[in-house]
Amino acid sequence: MEPLCSLAVTEGDTACFAVSVSGRPWPRVSWRHNGSDVVEGGSPYFEVLRSADGRRHSLRIGEVFAEDAGTVHVTAENDVGSVSASAQLSVTRAFIASEILHILGWNWFESLNIGATTLGTGRDWSLPPQLLGWGTNYVLVPLWPRS
């Protein structure tokens, strides 16, 4: 069995661990994630896959969450013996746009009313100087403390 490669992914991404195996008699392959057995069809997020010829085995995590970080372990065994490999899964938190804007001290508005003018389409060229950006469905304005 080839070594299992560690992965670093962002929350929401897919992670796929794969190995190739061979042996006589043909080995059985099993997967563990953070000490728990991963069984075929046991979870909608964890998929155990095997190529048509039975040589390539994969563990696919369809949507990775922070709590999925840890150790993935694979074992191939037959009547002659067994071989195993382990790898680490690191998960980086994904920031959504509103969180990033808040960190930058900006706020996100679907539309912004200034007097009788509604901004939000990005097509009004009489934008106030405090407006820092705009798009098709949003405008970005800095958050200032209210006095």
Image: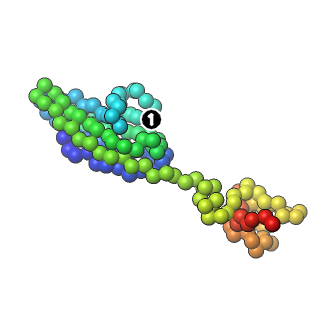
- Work out whether residue 22 can be spotted: yes
Task: Tell me which corner region of the image, top left, top right, bottom left or bottom right, holds residue 41.
Answer: top left
The quadrant of the image that shows the C terminus is: bottom right
Q: Please state the horizontal and vertical placement of residue 126, each as a whole percent of the image.
A: 80, 72
Q: Please state the horizontal and vertical placement of residue 73, each as a whole percent of the image.
A: 28, 38
**In the image, residue 131 above or below residue 41:** below
- Depth order, front residue of 13/6: 6
**In the image, residue 129 above or below residue 10:** below
Instruction: Give the colouring mode of the picture.
Output: rainbow
What residue sits 30% from the left and 33% below the top? 31
The kind of secondary structure element at disc 1 is: loop
- Work out whether residue 141 can be spotted: no
What residue sits 49% from the left and 51% below the top? 93
Which residue in the protein does label 1 denote?
45
Local crowd size for mark 1, using a 10 Å CA cut-off: few (<14), some (14–19), many (≥20): few
Residue 27 located left or right of residue 121: left
Q: Please state the horizontal and vertical placement of residue 47, each as a whole percent of the image.
A: 38, 34
Q: Going by the picture, which residue comes out furthest to the bottom?
A: 129
Q: Going by the picture, which residue comes out furthest to the right?
A: 116
- Depth order, front residue of 52/82: 82
Task: Tell me which corner region of the image, top left, top right, bottom left or bottom right, holds residue 130.
Answer: bottom right
The quadrant of the image that shows the N terminus is: top left
Residue 108 located left or right of residue 116: left
Residue 42 located left or right of residue 81: right
Amino acid tagged 1: Tyr
Residue 108 located left or right of residue 17: right
Number of numbered discs overlaid on the protein picture:
1
